[in-house]
Image: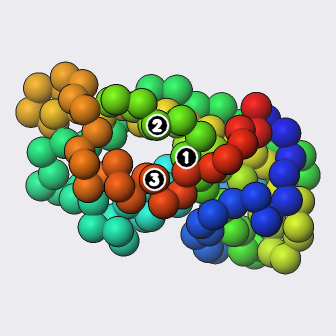
Amino acid sequence: MRAVPRSDWPHFVTISTRWMDNDVYGHVNNVQYYSYFDTAVNQFLIERGVLDIHKGEVVGFVVDSGCSYFSPVAFPDTIHVGIRVAKLGNSSVRYEIGIYRNDEQMPAAAGHFVHVYVERSSNRSVPIPAPVRSVLETIRGNTATT
């Protein structure tokens, strides 16, 4: 992934870092970034009314992810997570994510993950439901960061 400015993202979610996010080196541990990715995308979907984590019959499973790190983040920083859809398939969506520290204009990290939509009861892939697809179209990006 390459670093792109804040202006390249159609949607942001703000997340406060936590004391426990820091590792012994004094910065947010690399594994926390994947939690930020998941939190930002799922919060977006929940707020738009297309994800019911408890009762939804169709849910997205993460099947691929990756992250590139450019500069450290540490508690008590506030991060702003830019999200966009890079690819929207029949049953999968590839999100791209940028992590911005406080008011910085270039990202501390950038990554991606892929959701495959599945029927919860069978864990079999299904087409992305129309309401979800409509919401995802609102954050579809023009260019990929990879």
In percent of width and height, residue 47 lies at 36, 71
Which residue occupies 54% across, 35% down?
A: 87
Q: Quadrant of residue 48?
A: bottom left
What residue did someone put label 2 on? Answer: 88
Q: Secondary structure at mark 1?
A: strand
Q: Neighbour class for label 1 at 10 Å: few (<14), some, many (≥20)? A: many
* Sequence-earlier tag: 2 or 3: 2
Quadrant housing the N terminus: top right
Q: CA distance from mark 1 to mark 2?
A: 7 Å
Q: What kind of residue is marked 2?
A: Leu
Q: Quadrant of residue 12?
A: bottom right
Which of the two discs, 1 and 3, sits closer to the camera?
A: 3
Give the farthest residue toward the front: 142
Q: Mark 3 falls on what kind of element? A: helix
Q: Nearer the viewer, residue 19 or 143?
A: 143
As measured in the structure, the alpha-carbon distance from the residue carrying label 1 to the one carrying label 3 is: 8 Å
Q: Amino acid at mark 3?
A: Glu
Q: Are marks 1 and 3 in contact (CB under 8 Å)?
A: yes
Task: Confirm whether residue 11 shows in the render.
Answer: yes
At x 76%, y 32%, the residue is 146
Q: Which mark is residue 85?
A: 1
Task: Tell me which amino acid carries mark 1.
Answer: Val
Compared with 83, 87 (above or below) is: above
Q: How many residues crowd around disc 2 within 10 Å: few (fewer than 14), some, or many (20 or more)?
A: some
- On the image, the x and y values in percent for residue 66 come to 65, 32
- Residue at left 71%, top 68%? 79
Q: Which mark is residue 137?
A: 3
Asked if the residue at tag 3 contacts the one at tag 2, i.e. Cβ–Cβ closer than 8 Å, the answer is yes
Q: Residues within 10 Å of mark 3 (few under 14, many from 20)?
A: few
Tag 1 and tag 2, C-beta contact below 8 Å = yes
Q: Picture coordinates of residue 111 (x, y %)?
A: 69, 41
**Residue name at image x 61 percent, y 73 percent:** 14
